[in-house]
Each structure stands twice: as C-alpha cells, then as structure tokens.
Image (tube, coloured by chain):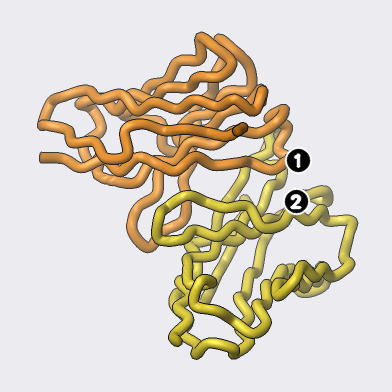
Chain colours: A yellow, B orange
Amino acid sequence: AQKVTQAQTEISVVEKEDVTLDCVYETRDTTYYLFWYKQPPSGELVFLIRRNSFDEQNEISGRYSWNFQKSTSSFNFTITASQVVDSAVYFCALSARAGSARQLTFGSGTQLTVLP
Amino acid sequence: DGGITQSPKYLFRKEGQNVTLSCEQNLNHDAMYWYRQDPGQGLRLIYYSQIVNDFQKGDIAEGYSVSREKKESFPLTVTSAQKNPTAFYLCASSDTGTGKETQYFGPGTRLLVL
C-alpha cells in the first residue's frame, strides 16, 4: 500500500518569513511520481510541481523550492519570503503502482496562513 | 482558453434524490477523474476513465455512478444510496491516464444535503 503523510496540519507565519512544508511518502514501487498542489480558498487545486523518482535534483522556481530525498522518502516544499497570497492548503501527492494500476494518493494537506 | 469546467458551483440535494455533477474539459485529455474532498482531509478517488465508454471504480465508488459517452465530458451522479454526500467534488483530467502524468483540476462543486 502507498501512503503520503503531511504531519503539519496547520502552519502560521508572518509575511516575509520562510516556511517549509513536510511530506513523507511510502511506496514499494521503484518508479513513482511526486506532486505538490496548492488549494486556495476558491477550492480549485493548482498544480505546482511534478518530480519522478529518478530525479533527485532540487528544484527552485522563484520563491518556491523543493527538496527530494529518496533516502528519507521525503519531498519537502519551501516558500521563501512568504506573502499573504501564499495562504492556502498545500497537498503532496504520490503516483505509484498498487497492484496492476497506478494510483494517485494525496496527503491530508497543510493549511498555511501567512499573516500581514 | 483550455481548461476544465464544473457545474454547478453549489448543489443542494434533498433526501432520496439523485443529482448529477457536470465536468467538461477542452484539453483533449484521454483520462478523467472524480474525487471527493471532506473537510480537513485529502482527496479520495471515486471513479476514473481512461477512454470513452470505459471507466473504473476508485476507492469510494459506492453510491455514485458515471458515464463517459464523449471524450470531453465525464458527469458524476450522486445517487440516493450515498448516505453522506455532503462534500466538495473535484473533477480532473490527464493526458493518457497512465499515472505518470500530471492531473489538472476543475474548480469543484460543493454538494449540500437539505
């Protein structure tokens, strides 16, 4: 079975602080894909990043960066110099083979509140 | 603009009533999905379809039904057999449905029981 754990249910920071959202995953599959999505108050899930299991390079996109560590089964997400508009629920997800088919499994999400 | 549309934004269901949620995409994606989200929880897969006229049950299919008569449309019916339908429903699509590609989501429909 596969599982995604986002242990931080809620995080509050003050604007301009850096914040890291943790994601730990479990899978027996050797080829898998990891995702981060943002869900603002409007409800729509916005795709942020996709990473495959063979690419452990960290990625930076503007104020966003992702740290993928296979050794600890983690795929953490850091927002640098947070802004109020970053306030949202962030979901980590894993696509891996469970039986004959791949399935996308979501974590329970981390509610990030950035205070002005 | 390419994207996924869901309607209505809010839907109210009376006891014993079937209701249908609409999902349309113009991304030319083969695969489409329906997820349910409950407060404070992640998304759970209801049904998915990798090709027209074919679909498979997800983790929580009981009380729901779908059809895939056209590539761009994947409506979800919440039947009276679903005893706890109040939730946020999200439709998604992806290029081929192999699980390797990204799923893109619509704006969602919030279903409430009267």
Outermost front residue: B1
> Which SS class for mark 2?
strand
| Vertical relation: A37 (above or below) B85 | below
Chain letter for mark 2, please.
A
The x, y position of residue B41, in whole percent, is: 41, 59
The x, y position of residue B14, in whole percent, is: 11, 31
Q: Tell me if B70 is positioned left or right of B83 in this view.
A: right
Chain letter for mark 1, please.
B
Q: Which mark is residue A89?
A: none
Q: Amino acid at mark 1?
A: Lys
Between the C-alphas of marks 2 and 1, the distance is 7 Å
Residue positioned 10% across, 40% down in the render: B114
Check chain identity for marks 2 and 1: say if they share one. Answer: no
Q: Tell me if B80 is positioned left or right of A55 in this view.
A: left
Q: Tell me if A34 is positioned left or right of B58 in this view.
A: right
> Which SS class for mark 1?
loop
Which of these two is toward me, A34 or A3? A34
Which of these two is toward me, A86 or A51? A86
Residue on which the image places disc 1:
B100
| Vertical relation: B3 (above or below) A17 | above
The x, y position of residue B72, in whole percent, is: 56, 19
Residue positioned 80% across, 70% down in the render: A60
Q: Amino acid at mark 2?
A: Tyr
Residue positioned 33% across, 23% down in the render: B77
Quadrant of the image occupied by residue B20? top left
Quadrant of the image occupied by residue A27? bottom right
Query: Neighbour class for label 1 at 10 Å: few (<14), some, many (≥20)?
Result: many
Residue on which the image places disc 2:
A33
| Vertical relation: A17 (above or below) A82 | below
Instruction: Answer whether labels 2 and 1 touch (C-beta < 8 Å).
Output: yes
Which quadrant of the figure contains the C terminus of chain A? Answer: bottom left
